[in-house]
Amino acid sequence: MIKQKTARVFISSTFRDMHTERDYLSKVIFPEIREELKQRGIYLVDVDLRWGITEEESEKGETLKICLDEIENSRPFFIGILGDRYGWIPDVSPSKMLNSTEKKIVQGKETSEDRFVWENKLKAGEHSVTALEIYYGVLNNLEQKKRSFFYFRDDKFIKDVPKEKVTDVKDEDKIQQKKLALLKKKIRDEYSDLPENLNDYGVKYKGLKINWLEIKNSTDQKNIDMEKLHKIADDGIVDNDEILELNADEKKLVFNNTFTYLDFDSLVEFGEKVKEDLLRSIYDVFPEDAEELDPLDQETMIHTNFCNDRSNFFVGREKQLQVISDYVIKNYSNKPLAIVGEPGSGKSALMAKAFSNCNSEEDNTLIIPHFVGCSPSSVVCFRTLNRFCTLIIRKFNIELEEGIPDEYNKLMECFKSIVKQIPEKGKLIIFIDALNQLSSSHKSHSLNWLPEILSENVKIIISALPGEVLASIEDKKFPQEKLGALNNNNREEIIRGRLKPYRKDTLTKEQMAVILKKEESGKPLYLTIVAEELRLYGEYERVNQKIAGFSENIEGLFDQIFKRLEDDTDDINLVRDAMCLFECSRFGLLETEMLQLLKPSVKDAINMGLIDTDKESFELPRKKWSTLFLSISTYFRSPGEDKTGLIDFFHRQMSKAVRKKYLNKKLEKSYHKKLAEYFHYQAFGKDPKLSFSGYDGRGFAELPYHRLLSGNRKEAEKLLTDFTFLMGKARTGLVTEILFDYELLNEYQEFNHEK
């Protein structure tokens, strides 16, 4: 297995006034950094302690110790963000809070020096916890300077904050102000030789972020017009103009149940600088391997990294793991073994763990992981079989007279033949996960390509959902192992395991009990989504409400994710259009296609400054796409490292959630019409005098499908009798697709489509 490298970064700032910056980093910038680091096998962990310290730990005075421990665990990466608040100053001395006799560790070795020698000399009330973090992390450890970055926020935005909420973002106390000024000066002085690690940034005030649950639970509802309040703050924000519409009691209620929030768009420059600084620093610590892998090994690395990710927090399923182990070792069956279960039941994680368990360094053993959907080529049966054949031939030195065939039917027979030629002392084990995600071309879901009888030294483990593939499994009488619900201990382990790297595995028994009572909490996918949403959530005071509000099932959780995306992007239409376009696509869409399909109107593009005239070409700004997509990309099929593969939903429940939340028959036809118009333009070509003179294979491949499903059967039939269109398909290598188009017409005699 390829060992995963981990870069932990500690984020230090005051909390109350820095919610927006921390949210922007966790929801926009860190997902972008993760996406880039993933290509080098580096896993990013951002340590944001807005919550993650238990009430018991806080009562015992362990807050400071936990913060400093996390800084130690995150070395050498440190981010400090300072505004106009100095932060909470404990009323006890650091020595009492730390209560530690630990020795300082330098380059992995314990020294004779006390770890907290400086902190233990301080008196109560001298420094805030934020200042202590900065001194411990950097100022008293100057060897950390190179990998530590500070960002100072300009205070001009404060003039727009309601006077009742100014204390949220600026200290009133003169002593606090003086201490903050001294801290900033100390940082700037120490970095006089490294000014590139210090950054100033400006922001724009947006409004007060409202908490509806607290307002609804408020006991003081006198003189409150809730209907008016809902109308004013339907986007979750009360801006300055909207405050003027409130009476005195309504203002008081709003001020008591909101916090100041900044405009995400005003943080773009700040976010890009954090991204640039961190990536440069991480790449210095984890330089790229000099050896360049060939395409076959690159593909294997993608599957192996996917396996690492899926098995990272695996718990339970001892019975199923033993069944797989016995199948591999004891030879109790000469057929492929099928792992089956409902959507979200953890088949991929089980397959990943089983692969890890039986991974062998023996020279005579080849173990191939194949997780359908983790790369663009993994969903195509032809390319999958070609990969298997190439790996097997290379490992066991099998010779083919005419090489690996280029024609699908011959390739299918070649694969079946090759697996029979494994040397007597050799062993072949293939894991193929999520067969239902294979493209249905060449009738791949019938499993006609999969050997039905295997020799003793060949084992194939497959997994699938209920549906066409499972029906094929049953027809072929393959042995099955079914996945049920996890027990409560395993459920809790998954949640805590996924939150632990971020120091948020501190849920109370009561909080955990609420989660475990949810209807679909027995499914690993449900628990994974809950853990990820909690990780992104930054309001400690409202964690209980967040947990109580989680949907009972996976489909409902995706609905809540869509709502979060609408809030994060501040663009309901963008989220709806993106999800509906994915849902109405045939096999998914390219990133480049989404950037075109989601672009604003020409008028809006001019107003946004994307173009100066209506003659210029433009697309959806990539920053807007990143904000939308990357924070939920784990729930999608990967487009590959070069972003040239199709993107589509990885989980069936996400598709159902989109249909329930956004789509009806009329809207569905309109999205198919939009896709048809786009692909028609791509296929038609730029010469208006020549029909279908383009060279865009996607346009020719997708146009008939979307014409038909937009309700325009006549136009679909017209395409398939248009010689220039048929020649265009042939020109772009899609001759066999023409037959599928005719089959499609027969399949959809009437428009009654359910994806």
Image (cartoon, rainbow, N blue to C red):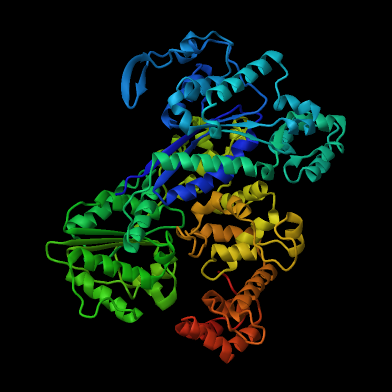
In the image, residue 459 sits, relative to residue 695, either above or below, namely above
Image location of residue 408, percent across then percent down: 35, 79
Measuring from the top left, give residue 752's x and y in whole percent: 61, 76
Which residue extends farthest left?
A: 425
State which quadrant residue 394 falls in.
bottom left
Q: Position of residue 166 (x, y in %)?
A: 75, 26
Task: Name the residue at 33% across, 81% down.
Answer: 409
Residue 181 versus residue 472 in the image, above or below = above
- Residue 267's image quarter? top right
Residue 404 visible within the image = yes
Task: Name the image quarter holding residue 269.
Answer: top right
Query: Left or right: where does residue 672 sit relative to residue 523?
Result: right
In screen coordinates, is 222 left or right of 36?
right
Specify the quadrant that holds the C terminus.
Answer: bottom right
Q: Position of residue 88 (x, y in %)?
A: 61, 19
In this view, which residue lies farthest toward the front? Answer: 193
Number of numbered labels in the structure image? 0
In the rendered structure, the answer to whether residue 26 lies left or right of residue 384 reads: right
Residue 517 in view? no
Frontmost residue, 624 versus 255? 624
Question: Closer to the camera, 548 or 158?
Answer: 158
User: In this rendering, is residue 128 above or below 231?
Assistant: above
